[in-house]
Image (tube, rainbow, N blue to C red):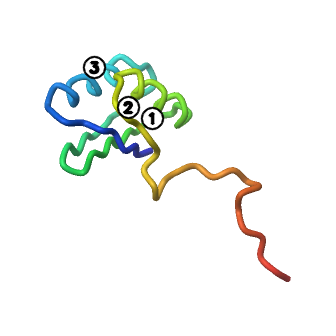
Amino acid sequence: MASQVGMSCQGCVGAVKRVLGKLEGVESYDIDFDAQKVTVKSNLPPETVLQTVSKTGKKTAYWEAEAPTKPEAKPVAAA
């Protein structure tokens, strides 16, 4: 799961590392400061990870390409 996280300095990166390091169920994570992207490998629901990272006070959102979709939001193919 990837998230876009507004990080303006290495202190922000440290805050994200701290919360992910304490979150039980996180197997690994990668922080790309330049792209403002945090990728997390976990068996937790994406919402849990996103809420935890947002507790740092940083602007947090799903990475566009990986935003979870609801079944009813999928287009229906015409028969």
Identify the secondary structure beneath mark 2. strand
Identify the secondary structure beneath mark 3. helix
* Residue under label 2: 27
Disc with the residue nearer the chain's start (1 vs 3): 3
Q: Who's the residue at 33% across and 39% down the image?
A: 5
Left or right of residue 14: residue 53: right
Mark 1 and mark 3: Cα distance apart in space: 16 Å
Q: Quadrant of residue 9?
A: top left
In the current view of this chain or complex, which residue is farthest to the bottom?
79
Q: Who's the residue at 31% across and 36% down the image?
A: 29
Amino acid type shown at disc 3: Arg
* Residue under label 3: 18
Amino acid type shown at disc 2: Glu
Q: Quadrant of residue 1?
A: top left
Q: Nearer the viewer, mark 2 or mark 3?
A: 3
* Residue under label 1: 42
